[in-house]
Amino acid sequence: MDDKTPIEGPVNSLIKNRLLRNETEMTNFLQSIDDLKLISATILLPNLFEAFVDEAENTAPLEVLISFIRSLDKNVFIENLIKATPMMEKKAFNWLKVLYLGALANLESRTILKDCLTKVSNKEHQIVHNILQAIALSDYDDIEVQESIKKDINFILN
């Protein structure tokens, strides 16, 4: 795959620079997100999840990528997040929790997630279940927030 391909180039650049170790990698990463905004990034969504790694040295560009991904169609985002979850589980577990917390943000997203989980393999369902349980067991400063998250997770899993 040529790194200069108009559609795939930005994704390849995200993956290449995903450790965000220096200013050049951060600049290239952020430029790739800007480039994605100019094309139909929805078709590239499955590949965008490869940019997430827990060992990234600077998380701000990854947070920009999350904002961009969340701006895409919710159905496509959640379906592709579930598909990418097994690949991300070992190298980006903390980012998976952040991404799934975003999917818990509103009733529409929770409903889409619940519906999508009825259509996936047992393995994918179990991995997502484990991530949601990890989110539910996390400590939050606000007890009301923690209870709300647990309630939202119970809605999805039951």
Image (cartoon, grey):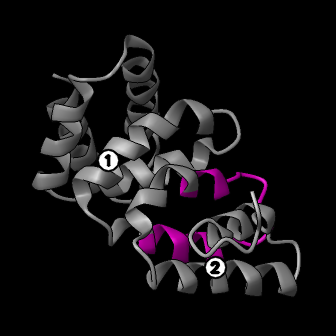
- Residue depicted at 73% across the width and 74% down the height: 4
Query: In front here: 142 or 113?
Result: 113
Amino acid under label 2?
Answer: Ser
Taking 135 as reference, is 47 above or below it? below
Q: Which mark is residue 17?
A: none
- Left or right position of 145 against 114: right
Give the residue pinned by disc 2.
32
- Residue depicted at 65% across the width and 83% down the height: 30
What is the span of residues highlighted in magenta in the rendered image?
Answer: 48-68
Task: Tell me if I can see residue 143 in this picture.
Answer: no
Q: Nearer the viewer, mark 1 or mark 2?
A: 2
Question: Can you give x and y, in whole percent of width and height, for residue 151 in the image?
Answer: 18, 39
Answer whether residue 117 is magenta in the image: no
- How packed is label 2: few (under 14 Cα within 10 Å), some, or many (20 or more)? many
Answer whether residue 52 is magenta in the image: yes
Quick one: SS at disc 2?
A: helix
Taking 34 as reference, is 6 above or below it? above
Residue 92, picture quadrant:
top right
Give the residue pinned by disc 1.
78
